Amino acid sequence: MTIAFPDWLAICETKARYCRLMDTKDWQGWADCFVEDLVLDTSPAGGLRVEGRDAAVAYVRGAIEQARTAHQVHNPEIALEPDGASARVVWAMNDRVEMAQDRQAAVGEVGHTGYGHYHERYVRCPDGAWRIAETRLSYLQYDSRPLPSPG
């Protein structure tokens, strides 16, 4: 089903906000990119599957609160579902993460640069906004920057 340009643009703007708000650590604003019953699945990228917006925000916040991050998405493939109120989207993505020093030992790296995809489902909410209902992250390439050798 062909998506109308205003809906296409609104979905793109939601994901743009997602990246900016996560990288600037605006957790309240970031949470508003999602529906309450969000499913966040980072297990293909080595993370966890988390259900519920509050739990997902807490999980991500706990992992990168003090990290310096830069997330970018590109080339959206957007397909409107037959109901007209939801859409499937695949985003090419890359992220750069510089872990906070106190988290480096726990995660086993100084940081990473990853390249992959977000596979997502968006829904049009009663207020007219498009929000993310499901998101799954997978990497095609993951360049870890390991901890320096002692000594």
Image: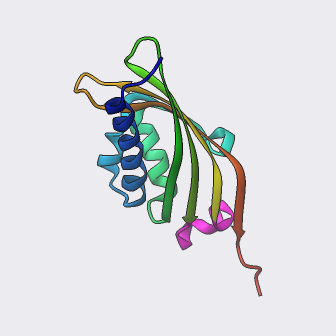
Examine the structure image and report whether residue 85 is included in the region drawn in magenta: no
* Residue furthest bottom as drawn: 151
Image coordinates of residue 84 in percent, x first then y, are 39, 16
Image coordinates of residue 81 in percent, x first then y, are 47, 17
In percent of the image, x 58 and y 54: which residue is there?
A: 94
The one nearer the camera, 79 or 42, is 79
- From the viewer's perspective, is residue 79 above or below residue 108? above
In percent of the image, x 31 and y 40: which residue is there?
A: 32
Give the side of residue 142 with respect to residue 34, left or right: right
Image coordinates of residue 146 in percent, x first then y, are 72, 70
- From the viewer's perspective, is residue 30 above or below residue 24? above
In percent of the image, x 39 and y 38: which residue is there?
A: 54
Give the side of residue 25 with respect to residue 96, left or right: left
Q: Quadrant of the C terminus?
A: bottom right
In this picture the colour scheme is: rainbow
Q: Which residues are magenta?
A: 98-111
* Residue furthest left as drawn: 127
Image coordinates of residue 33 in percent, x first then y, are 36, 39
- From the viewer's perspective, is residue 151 above or below residue 116? below
Question: How many labels, in total?
Answer: 0
* Residue furthest top as drawn: 83
In percent of the image, x 49 and y 65: which residue is there?
A: 67
